[in-house]
Image (spheres, helix red, strand yellow):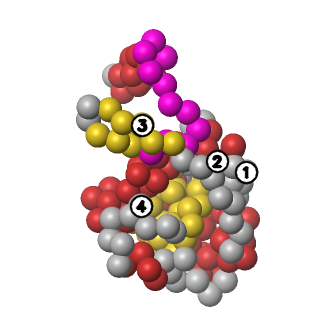
Amino acid sequence: MILVAANPYRGRRGPRARVAALVHALEARGLRVRVMWDPTERTAALGNRAALRHVRCVVAAGGDGTVSAVINELSADVALAVLPLGNENLFAKAFGFEDDPGALAHAIARGVRQPIDLGRAHTTAGSRLFTLMLTAGFDAEVVHRFTRWRRSF
């Protein structure tokens, strides 16, 4: 079973059509696929350690925020793949995830894996895993202000 944790609000090129192309390519290779568009459903599925025993791979279909959410919600050691649908896709670029659903399906079917190290940040709000970077102070404030500004449109 392949779980696709998809963010319907990301991407400049139709996230639903790109996820559908990935599903088609995976199913053409004989793999069973379940797509989760709802964040509540995603959190419940990824937090169910027993159910993840039957999952071969989780695909984060979205941007860097989706990748971060999936990494922090995964309750078991399951392979993670990324279908880049965001604006920058820094994680996908850093780890070589292609922008092609067919190529991603091929890599998943072949079982290609690359181990990565994760960091853990502890704050008063709890702890979170992170992959590429962690910002604090001035840097973090700029990111928060920019995010608020973008959401005002």
Give the Cα separation between the discs numbered 1 and 4. Answer: 21 Å
- Residue 74 circle label: 4
Judge from the rendering whether residue 47 lies leftward or rightward of residue 103; answer left or right: left
| Secondary structure found at label 2 | helix
| Distance between the alpha carbons at the discs numbered 1 and 2 | 6 Å
Q: Kindly identify the residue that appears in the image at 32 percent across and 32 percent down.
A: 123
The residue singled out by tag 3 in the image is 121
Q: Position of residue 149 (x, y in %)?
A: 39, 19
Badges 3 and 1: C-beta atoms under 8 Å apart?
Answer: no
Spatial separation of the CA atoms under disc 3 and disc 4: 16 Å
Q: Does the magenta stretch include residue 150?
A: no
Of circles 4 and 2, which is in front?
4
Majority secondary structure in the magenta region = loop
Q: Mark 2 points at which residue?
A: 92
Q: How many residues crowd around disc 4 within 10 Å: few (fewer than 14), some, or many (20 or more)?
A: many
Looking at the image, do the residues carrying marks 4 and 2 touch, with CB atoms under 8 Å apart? Answer: no
